[in-house]
């Protein structure tokens, strides 16, 4: 039997033991493994190498699967070989990855000194595999997890110690790893004790929280359970393989120290035992003082009995002074306190079903008050900010989206829209402590009311962000949300809780900075360059180059990246190594073919030459169309460059293809940016400006050498002509490129700073030294191109103005060929219009760059309309049809200006009615096709007019030549009459006597019925006829020329000739022997022959002359050519009545006859009838009168006489022309007057 202790002295009663502290204040269990002795700790913090050396030895490094490089150097980051599994950065150890490498033993405390560690290996960012880094996973580590691991405060990922044999509690110091983001795993170990509340301090944790398959007990702390909402159910594992449904078993209490025995009293014995029992005991007769049994307590001295524990309390040990409450979350219902066995163990306390907990006196299960929830230890904890617990809630819940709880112990969440005037507020997610987000279609700013400067929202320069925002205000608790809610700008999408940094940028839009709400439409050339928010941008940012398609970069994705070039047609940035999409050689070949055709087609012969001559006017009219399309392309370019809208997409693609040919951008066509490194706008500016200067210098050198060698004037050669052609069409493009150097655009950065870049090359910041160099060079080129070249062209034409004004043809003579491109389109006196058109072209391109978009289009509209009116009213063109084409092309330009204005309204005015851009494009394309048709029609009409003019000129010249011949014939006839001492009257009388004997109707005999019989009869009597007529004419001094017999087909053709009027009757053919001519040298012999034929006088041999049947008198009534002859139809005796024809002519006139006949044949071949001839005579007479009037006025002017009232204007006959030969005017008028007198006498 245990000896009874002596009673406690009454003067110093033993104080009751201190009550056990409440569980809510008890920290996490202290590790059972004793801490290392301080003598074992190093005196200073070891280096990374020393710490890893200790780690190597503690984990049996010699037995690792792989230990390459370990301990071969003192520092793992500076040795000649790397240590296996160790990663370094900037000379410090940043990762350890030794999972599955056969580690054993324990983790030393020195691991906590490697404070540069950030992860258990390198995360595989390429594959996105979060589990690729293993730290010390799947090893054979034992012992407890050292608390010093909490010193690795920079650890971010993969603290993976799973599949090991470690034991003991989880250190509370792990809560110091607040930056840990993913991969915390102690799975499949032997960890024991409760889960530390401090783990909830891992506020950045997002993935892979695993404590399964251990020996953990107790309840999950509410704060740790909150990580479930943060991490997600799929990557938050705690309960499996642990005993977390009940509290942890209570460890056996420390034994109460034994009260030292009281020294024995004096040897004088006491008569019997003294009744003095202490606390926790009772007195039993015969036994003395004994301890109170379990389930009871003794709170009085010298008690005879012990008291049964009250409900909710237990006494698990004997001799207790008091009973203790049941553990948290347990209760005991024994209201009668009758049975100690119901209170002798904590197992007598029943567990409350979670989340219920025991009341304060542990007599029943109850719930926490509003705003609180039970934790794993059974204590009510206040709900954290952002969480709430209502009357019916057993645990805290996160506030839903759109609600918030700014304080702890909240019983409800406040709605962000409690203020009915602000319906824009929301929260980022559940569990928010403030209205820290905005609803869909709004974004949260970084300022309380939005930015107040112009140009801080959308893409309009004057838009202010604040005007689109609902300002931030304090809620009922005095908590501000942190920023204003602003309407999502055009070009961006705000799907939900969106901040200005997370704006979803749409396709074809771009912004400079993540803090800027200025979302701009992407570049006009290729708007698809801006892809909007995609996988790349979402992972890295929603601004800048992240929004650009591959190959594009810079502001508005307007530049091409290194090793990329811009395609001249598609405007895409194409890889320099992509030969399939290289269109540059195609353009070069096409341009060379066109140039060669322009040079060699005029020199060709045959069908090609005829085709060229027929349609050469199309080339002349095509120059107007080419200039028009240059203006159309430039209008869009300069309008977009100042922030305006471009043409609709379909028409834009058409203009891009046309622009590649007519603008001839050498830099883009030849892809020089693939050949020259670090090219920018300055390189392009130098190429396009210095190339024409170099070409000009080369051409002038060649021309001067040619001139020095006696080859003519240096400014009139073909090389100089092509130089003018080259500069004429290249000037507007070069001038636009030069003027672009002075334009800068500003862009919002989201801060007080403004970014400014060159408008034409947004890789060049405005204001820096390089930009100043570009502007200085462009200033010099302004003097050379937009100003110098037009002035040079003007002086070139001014020096030749007199020759230009006196030119007979449109292009002038050969000496003006080099300048014909400039003045050829314009009238003689309007040559200076070429310079006016130069400035019109420049005004509609580069000069518009100085104006903002709206004023730019207004100015362009005014210039276009003014030029059309001037063309219509002034008629400055050489050909009226060319003026018509110019006028219509002017309207096309005006329509393009209106299309740009309409696009501006669509782009900038949200209230504008939307119209499909394809409709506008179709209208513009149809208009331009109509212009092409008009050009061909006008060119064809101009060609026909030109040919008709040439025919008119031809007949005028033929009539003049005919008149000249008539004058010559008349002079010859006068000479003949004078030599014969005769007169026209005498000749007329002589002929009249012969005419009186003839029959006006003459035909062959009745025996001749067919052409064949006429042919045979003629052939039969050819010799007698020739002999008779020869003897007859030669007897009178004439020269006889034999004729020939017409063949049968000729006779038939003569009979059917409508001009003869024979009606197919072969008997009417009275000249079957054609070509018999008697030529007289004088009029006297001619008169004798006529008299002999008239009176039938026989010749000297007594032969009777042939009988005259008909006389055609073209002597007194000359032919149209003025030629005089006499035709006689005769019947020779002895020829079976055959009728033949003898022509009598005069020798002097016969010499001139071939030329007169050729002129007559030309008139007949050209198809000029008598009306045409009469009109020609009338025109010539008017022209002669006009010239005489001008000559008279000039003479009068020399004498100071004003003949204005004396000279009447000559009305030009409708359809007339002005071509004539001035050298024959007076003779022609005299001849007309003589003919009028002759006709009067005949009448």
Image (cartoon, rainbow, N blue to C red):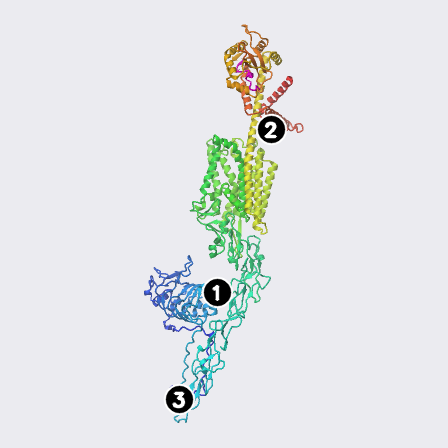
40 and 459: which one is in front? 459
* SS state under label 3: loop
Judged left or right of residue 197, residue 1066 is right
| 1 or 2: tag closer to the N-terminus | 1
| 3 or 1: tag closer to the N-terminus | 1
Which of the labelled discs sits on residue 418, or is there none? none
Dot in front, 3 or 1: 1
Instruction: Measure the C-alpha gap from mark 1 to mark 2.
Output: 99 Å
Instruction: Measure the C-alpha gap from mark 3 to mark 1.
Output: 67 Å
Dot in front, 1 or 2: 1
Which of the labelled discs sits on residue 1216, or is there none? 2
Numbered range of the magenta stretch: 1061-1078
Q: Is residue 180 visible?
A: no
Looking at the figure, which quarter contains the N terminus?
bottom left
> x, y (%) of residue 609?
49, 31
Badge 1 density bin: few <14, some 14–19, many ≥20, Cα 10 Å: some
1233 and 433: which one is in front? 433
Circle 1 is placed at which residue position?
Answer: 229
Circle 3 is placed at which residue position?
Answer: 263
Examine the rendered structure and indicate whether residue 302 appears above or below residue 831: below
> x, y (%) of residue 232?
46, 63
Residue ranking furthest to the right: 1205
Quadrant of residue 1162 within the rendered picture:
top right
Residues at badges 3 and 1 in contact (C-beta under 8 Å)?
A: no
Looking at the figure, which quarter contains the C terminus?
top right
Quadrant of residue 217 within the rendered picture:
bottom left
Q: Main secondary structure of the magenta part?
A: loop
């Amino acid at each position: 039997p245990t000896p009874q202790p002596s009673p406690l002295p009454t003067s110093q009663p033993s104080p009751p033991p201190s009550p056990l502290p409440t569980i809510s204040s008890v920290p996490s269990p202290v590790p059972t493994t004793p801490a290392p002795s301080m003598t074992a700790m190093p005196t200073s913090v070891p280096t990374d190498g020393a710490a890893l050396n200790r780690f190597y030895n503690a984990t049996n490094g010699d037995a690792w699967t792989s230990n390459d490089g370990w301990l071969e150097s003192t520092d793992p980051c500076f040795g000649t070989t790397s240590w296996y599994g160790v990663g370094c950065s900037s000379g410090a150890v940043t990762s350890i990855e030794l999972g599955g490498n056969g580690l054993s033993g324990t983790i030393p405390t020195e691991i906590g000194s490697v404070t540069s560690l950030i992860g258990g290996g390198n995360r595989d960012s390429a594959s996105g595999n979060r589990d690729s880094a293993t730290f010390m996973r799947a090893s054979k580590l034992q012992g407890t997890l050292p608390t010093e691991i909490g010193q690795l405060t920079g650890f971010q990922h993969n603290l993976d110690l799973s599949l090991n044999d470690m034991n003991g509690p989880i250190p509370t110091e792990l809560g110091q790893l607040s930056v840990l983001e993913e991969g915390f795993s102690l799975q499949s170990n032997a960890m024991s004790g409760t889960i530390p509340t401090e783990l909830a301090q891992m506020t950045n944790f997002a993935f892979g929280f695993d404590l399964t398959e251990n020996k953990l007990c107790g309840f999950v702390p509410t704060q740790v359970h909150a990580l479930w909402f943060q991490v997600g159910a799929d990557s938050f594992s705690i309960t499996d393989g642990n005993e977390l449904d009940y509290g942890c078993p209570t460890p056996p209490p420390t034994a109460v120290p034994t009260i030292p025995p009281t020294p024995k009293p004096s040897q004088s014995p006491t008569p019997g035992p003294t009744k003095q029992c202490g606390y926790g005991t009772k007195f039993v007769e015969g036994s003395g003082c004994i301890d109170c049994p379990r389930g009871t307590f003794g709170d009085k001295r010298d008690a005879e009995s012990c008291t049964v524990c009250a409900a909710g309390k237990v006494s698990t040990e004997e001799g207790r002074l008091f009973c203790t409450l049941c553990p948290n979350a347990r209760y005991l219902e024994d209201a009668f306190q009758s049975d100690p066995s119901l209170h002798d163990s904590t197992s007598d306390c029943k567990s409350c079903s979670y989340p219920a907990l025991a009341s304060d006196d542990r007599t029943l299960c109850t719930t926490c008050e509003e705003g609180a929830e039970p934790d794993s230890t059974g204590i009510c904890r206040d709900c954290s900010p952002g969480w709430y617990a209502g009357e019916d809630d057993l645990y805290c819940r996160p506030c839903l989206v759109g609600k918030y709880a700014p304080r702890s112990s909240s019983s409800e969440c406040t709605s962000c829209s409690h203020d009915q005037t602000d319906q824009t507020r929301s929260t980022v997610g559940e569990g928010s402590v403030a209205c820290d987000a905005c609803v869909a279609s709004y974004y949260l700013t970084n300022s309380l009311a939005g930015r107040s400067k112009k140009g801080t929202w959308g893409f309009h320069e004057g838009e202010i962000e604040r005007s689109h925002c609902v300002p931030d205000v304090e809620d009922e608790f005095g908590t501000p949300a942190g920023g204003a809610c602003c309407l999502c700008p055009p070009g961006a999408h705000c799907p939900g809780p969106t901040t200005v940094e997370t704006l979803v940028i749409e396709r074809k839009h771009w912004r400079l900075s993540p803090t800027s709400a200025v979302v701009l439409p992407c570049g006009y050339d290729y708007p698809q360059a801006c892809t909007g928010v995609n996988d790349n941008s979402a992972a890295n940012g929603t601004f800048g180059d992240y929004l650009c398609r591959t190959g594009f970069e810079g502001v508005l994705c307007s530049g091409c990246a290194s090793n990329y070039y811009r395609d001249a047609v598609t405007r895409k940035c194409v890889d320099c190594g992509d030969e399939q999409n290289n269109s540059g050689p195609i353009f070069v070949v096409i341009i060379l073919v066109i140039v060669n055709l322009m040079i060699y087609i005029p020199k060709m012969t045959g069908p090609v030459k005829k085709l060229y001559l027929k349609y050469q006017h199309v080339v002349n009219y095509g120059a107007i169309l080419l200039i028009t399309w240059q203006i159309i392309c430039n209008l869009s370019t300069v309008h977009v460059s100042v922030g305006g809208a471009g043409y609709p997409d379909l028409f834009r693609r058409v203009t891009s293809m046309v622009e590649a040919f007519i603008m001839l951008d050498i830099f883009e066509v030849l892809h020089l940016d693939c050949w020259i490194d670090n090219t920018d706008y300055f390189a392009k500016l130098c190429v396009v400006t210095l190339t024409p200067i170099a070409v000009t210098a080369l051409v002038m050198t060649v021309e001067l050498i040619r001139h020095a060698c006696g080859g003519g004037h240096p400014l009139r050669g073909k090389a100089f002509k092509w130089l003018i052609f080259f500069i004429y069409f290249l000037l507007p493009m070069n001038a636009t490129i030069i003027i672009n150097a002075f334009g800068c655009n500003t862009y919002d950065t989201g801060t007080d700073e403004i970014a400014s870049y060159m408008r034409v090359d947004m890789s060049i910041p405005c204001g820096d030294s390089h930009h100043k160099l570009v502007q200085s060079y462009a200033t010099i080129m302004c003097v050379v191109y937009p100003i110098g070249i037009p002035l040079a062209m003007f002086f070139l034409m001014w020096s030749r103005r007199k020759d230009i004004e006196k030119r007979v043809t449109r292009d002038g003579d050969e000496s003006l060929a080099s300048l014909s491109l400039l003045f050829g389109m314009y009238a003689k006196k309007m040559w200076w219009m070429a310079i006016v058109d130069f400035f019109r072209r420049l005004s509609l391109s580069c000069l518009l760059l100085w104006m903002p978009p709206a004023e730019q289009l207004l100015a362009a509209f005014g210039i276009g309309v003014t030029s059309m009116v001037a063309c219509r009213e002034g008629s400055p063109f050489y050909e009226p049809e060319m003026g018509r084409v110019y006028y219509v092309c002017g309207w096309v330009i005006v329509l393009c200006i209106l299309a740009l204005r309409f696009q501006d309204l669509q782009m900038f005015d949200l209230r504008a009615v939307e119209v499909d851009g394809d409709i506008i494009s179709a209208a513009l394309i149809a208009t331009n096709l109509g212009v092409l048709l008009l050009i061909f029609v006008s060119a064809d009409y101009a060609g026909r007019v030109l040919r008709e003019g040439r025919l008119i000129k031809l007949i005028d010249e033929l009539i003049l030549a005919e008149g000249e011949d008539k004058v010559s014939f008349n002079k010859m006839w006068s000479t003949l009459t004078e030599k014969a001492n005769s007169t026209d009257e005498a000749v007329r009388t002589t002929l009249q006597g012969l005419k009186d004997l003839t029959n006006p109707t003459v035909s062959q005999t009745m025996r001749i019925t067919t052409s064949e019989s006429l042919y045979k009869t003629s052939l039969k009597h050819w010799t007698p006829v020739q002999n008779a007529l020869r003897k007859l004419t030669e007897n009178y001094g004439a020269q006889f020329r034999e004729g020939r017999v017409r063949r049968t087909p000729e006779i038939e053709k003569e009979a059917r000739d409508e001009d003869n009027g024979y009606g197919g009757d072969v008997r009417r053919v009275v000249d079957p022997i054609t070509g018999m001519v008697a030529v007289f040298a004088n009029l006297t012999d001619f008169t004798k022959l006529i008299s002999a034929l008239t009176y039938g006088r026989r010749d000297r041999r007594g032969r009777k002359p042939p009988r005259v049947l008909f006389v055609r008198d073209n002597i007194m009534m000359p032919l149209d050519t003025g030629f005089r002859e006499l035709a006689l139809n005769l019947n020779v005796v002895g020829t079976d009545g055959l009728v033949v024809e003898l022509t009598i002519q005069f020798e002097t006139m016969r010499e001139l006859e071939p030329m007169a006949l050729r002129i007559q044949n030309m008139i007949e071949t050209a198809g000029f009838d008598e009306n045409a001839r009469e009109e020609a005579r009338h025109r010539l007479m008017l022209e002669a009168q006009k010239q005489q009037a001008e000559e008279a006025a000039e003479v009068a002017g020399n004498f100071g006489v004003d003949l204005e009232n004396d000279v009447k204007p000559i009305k030009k006959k409708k359809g007339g022309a002005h071509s004539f030969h001035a050298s024959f005017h007076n003779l022609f008028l005299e001849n007309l007057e003589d003919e009028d007198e002759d006709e009067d006498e005949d009448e």
